[in-house]
Image (cartoon, coloured by chain):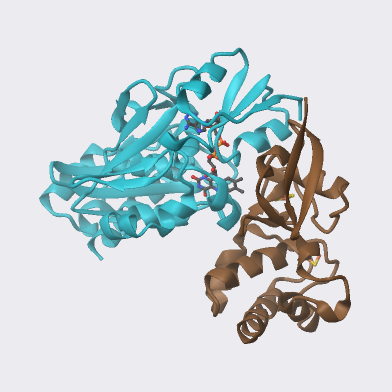
Chain colours: A brown, B cyan
Amino acid sequence: MTVSISFQLNGTSAQLDVADSQLLVEALRQHGSTGTHIGCDTSQCGACVIHVDGKSVKSCTMLAVQVDGKSVTTIEGLTQGQAEDMHPMQQAFKQHHGLQCGYCTPGMVMSAIDLVNHNPDPDEKQIREWLEGNICRCTGYHNIVKAVKHGAQMMREV
Amino acid sequence: MYQFAYHHPDNLNQAKELLTAEESKPIAGGMTLIPTLKQRLAAYESLVDLSSIAELQGISETSESIRIGAMTTHSDVHHSDTIKTKIPALSHLAGSIGDVQVRNRGTLGGSIANADPAADYPAAVVGLGATIHTAERDIAADNFFTALFETALKENEIITAVSFPVPEKAGYAKFANPASRYAIVGVMAVKTRSGIRVAVTGAAGSVFRVPEMEQALGDAFTADAVRGIAVSSAEFNSDMHATADYRGHLVSVMAARAVDAANA
Ligand SMILES: Cc1cc2nc3c(=O)[nH]c(=O)nc-3n(C[C@H](O)[C@H](O)[C@H](O)COP(=O)(O)OP(=O)(O)OC[C@H]3O[C@@H](n4cnc5c(N)ncnc54)[C@H](O)[C@@H]3O)c2cc1C
Ligand code: FES
Ligand code: FES
């Protein structure tokens, strides 16, 4: 069956026709939000992390119909499209080389922002614990942790 | 995934009605069910989403126990001030499940209905001697988990809430799988008004109690009382993560740590 859902996507209202069994991540990507990645089949990698009603979730493990009436933020929702407009957390990842191939990065950034919303000044241990559900195959995490720490500081300052 | 129809009832009667249909299944946080569907390990005609049913929500407190709605997420249990004050070990346990995003969606009801041998909640439910409330009846924790991925629930019987008696003290310690955070072995050690309860998850096909340890802790509620008690690992799980013998060893170590945590 196909149902029509309406929700807030990055601050504007969106209407989508989706199959009952369609995954949220697929619906978002087909709608053009291809910054949200799919990295696994086991709900473990975090490449698909977005915010639903302000909380970070794995969009590969939700159905598209489940966001009907809700508010969704993806990595695209953080900027107006200009590099200068990057969100402080994105700037910090760039500055600290918190990415190499970039595949995990949208999920890392969305997860890190949720952390800072809960805890404006996380220490290294808290950052590593929080990123348990985000796997990176490239960086070895050190620069990601540095980026999140600095990103948190910049978020406190704006 | 195979196709299915999605229903989103807003009350319990409607959900029960929808679940009488053949090949229907409740969906809570979906953190176990959706990966299973993705891997085509299961297929249903319809899923019934329990997230908008008021009876399944909320945390409430009576003088002797805390009642937690089946749809309460692991995050909400972890952060609840009531639970932090009355049963800190339960808040700690919920906060140790998986990762933040799993905790933001996964629920108490989904976890115990699924009865994964490596899940954390079964140790708390049995350790604290909880009561499982369903849409039809109440089930005592000791009778709930029957075997590997098996419970006393009838086909599509809906868990509405779980009541946890407030203990005198309780502690939980787990040796976590470094990738998933599931328990390779997890032990809940509890001192209640009516006696001691020690529940072990992760080691065998289903959660179980350890009478020898309960007896020893009744004499002296100290880590030393259990450290030396060896359990038989003959029926324990053996897999790429740990052999049965190693799990046996971990039961004593985790039990001692759980008692230390309870006494802290
Ligand atoms: C990466 C990852 C790591 C994880 N790590 C851990 C861990 O460390 N420890 C741990 O304990 N768990 C872990 N989990 C599992 C997690 O806790 C799940 O949330 C839980 O097993 C299932 O809860 P759910 O709400 O998502 O249920 P769902 O997936 O929605 O449902 C699971 C089953 O329960 C049934 N069900 C759901 N609610 C009810 C109800 N109210 N009444 C009757 N039946 C119901 C469903 O029909 C289904 O069969 C992990 C999961 C993932 C993906
Ligand atoms: S794609 Fe890996 S967790 Fe969602
Ligand atoms: S930068 Fe390549 S996976 Fe993280």
Res B186 seen here? yes
The residue that appears at 73% across and 61% down in the rendered structure is: A107
**Which quadrant would the C terminus of chain B be assigned to in this image?**
bottom left
- Work out which residue is located at the far bottom of the displayed protein and give it: A157
**Which quadrant would the N terminus of chain B be assigned to in this image?**
top right
The answer to whether residue B120 is left or right of residue B87 is: right
Res B117 seen here? no
The answer to whether residue B32 is left or right of residue B45 is: left
Quarter of image, res A117: bottom right
Q: Position of residue A108 (x, y in %)?
A: 71, 65
The residue that appears at 86% across and 48% down in the rendered structure is: A31
Vertically, is A116 above or below B260?
below
The residue that appears at 39% across and 24% down in the rendered structure is: B135
Q: Position of residue B140 (x, y in %)?
A: 28, 29
Q: Position of residue A97 (x, y in %)?
A: 79, 79
The residue that appears at 19% across and 49% down in the rendered structure is: B191
- Work out which residue is located at the far front of the displayed protein and give it: A13
